[in-house]
């Protein structure tokens, strides 16, 4: 007979994933002004929600206001600075690090070197579509925000040519990335101390659930030959656990009948 613990393995894993990933994202969005759009919604008190106003009013947490941090983040994102690409890294802290789901952490010099040698904007017309800026109520020097990035393939990229207008696959020039959650951390002098991002819904878009540069590689059919540059696939062990758990659940139902 299968044990009750074995039967519950898939459900425990699912619950753990939801608790660890989905709930922090919901809280981050709920703290943003964009998360409420009516007086009725604003009046709702969520059990377990932080007192954002009280935390934001604490001057000892960080010497700059939420509005200052968000304005600074938008300045750094704008084309005149472009995350350090256009100002020779002037916006970056000396101990700056870039970190994403797979890449990083990498330091300032390596980051700037990578940007100078890998310019997506030369091959794609990119629309970042940022939204949802908010300051973390606990980590007061961090700005969270999202985007729904799209890109049109307009010039050769890693040997891949854009589809011509009369090509039946011309629609493949249009790339739609999954929504991504970004963060920028600042030091006391409003220099960018850390920058990173993660995809938050791999089922959306047409880049295999991949974000960042990996999305563009996959989108034009030139992904790197590593698992991290491929759409997510469950490991053999995960699939085996799910299969065993499914069988256990079926046997459990039959025994009850």
Image (cartoon, helix red, strand yellow):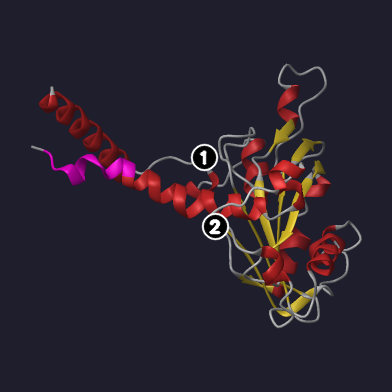
Tell me which segment is drawn in magenta. Answer: 2-11
Residue shown at the point (66%, 43%) measured from the top left = 179
Where is residue 213 drawn, in percent x and y?
67, 49
Instruction: Using the image, tell me which numbered label, if any, was put on residue 61.
Output: none
Please determine whether, in this image, residue 43 is positioned above or below residue 195.
above
Q: Position of residue 172 (x, y in %)?
A: 71, 27
Instruction: Judge whether residue 63 is colored magenta.
Output: no
Q: Quadrant of the C terminus?
A: top left
The residue sitting at 87% across, 57% down in the picture is 78
| Residue drawn at point x = 66 percent, y = 66 percent | 137
Q: Nearer the viewer, residue 245 or 36?
A: 36
Residue projecting furthest to the left: 1
Viewer can see residue 31: yes
Give the label on residue 102, or none: 2
Residue projecting furthest to the right: 80
| Rendered position, 54 above or below 213 | below
Left or right of 47 on screen, residue 81: right
* Position of residue 127 in the picture relative to residue 194 (left or right): right
- Mark pair 2, 1: CA separation: 13 Å
């Amino acid at each position: 007979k299968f044990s009750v613990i074995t039967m519950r393995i898939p459900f425990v894993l699912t619950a753990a994933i939801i608790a660890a990933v989905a709930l922090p994202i919901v809280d981050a969005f709920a703290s943003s002004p964009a998360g409420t759009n009516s007086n009725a919604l604003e009046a709702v008190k969520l059990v377990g929600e932080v007192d954002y106003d009280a935390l934001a009013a604490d001057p000892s947490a960080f010497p700059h206001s939420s509005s200052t941090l968000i304005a600074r983040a938008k300045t750094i994102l704008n084309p005149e600075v472009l995350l350090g690409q256009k100002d020779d890294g002037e916006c970056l802290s000396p101990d700056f690090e870039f970190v994403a789901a797979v890449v990083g952490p990498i330091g300032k010099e390596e980051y700037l070197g990578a940007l100078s040698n890998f310019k997506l904007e030369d091959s794609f017309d990119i629309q970042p579509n940022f939204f949802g800026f908010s300051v973390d109520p606990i980590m007061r020097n961090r700005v969270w925000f999202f985007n729904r990035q799209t890109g049109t393939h307009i010039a050769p990229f890693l040997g891949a040519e854009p589809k011509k207008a009369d090509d039946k696959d011309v629609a493949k020039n249009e790339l739609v990335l999954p929504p991504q959650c970004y963060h920028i951390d600042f030091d006391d002098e409003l220099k960018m101390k850390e920058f990173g991002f993660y995809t938050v819904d791999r089922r959306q878009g047409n880049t295999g659930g991949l974000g960042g540069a990996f999305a563009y590689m996959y989108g034009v059919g030139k992904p790197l030959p590593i698992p991290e540059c491929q759409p997510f696939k469950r490991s053999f062990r995960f699939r085996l656990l799910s299969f065993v758990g499914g069988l256990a659940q079926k046997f459990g139902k039959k025994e009850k009948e």
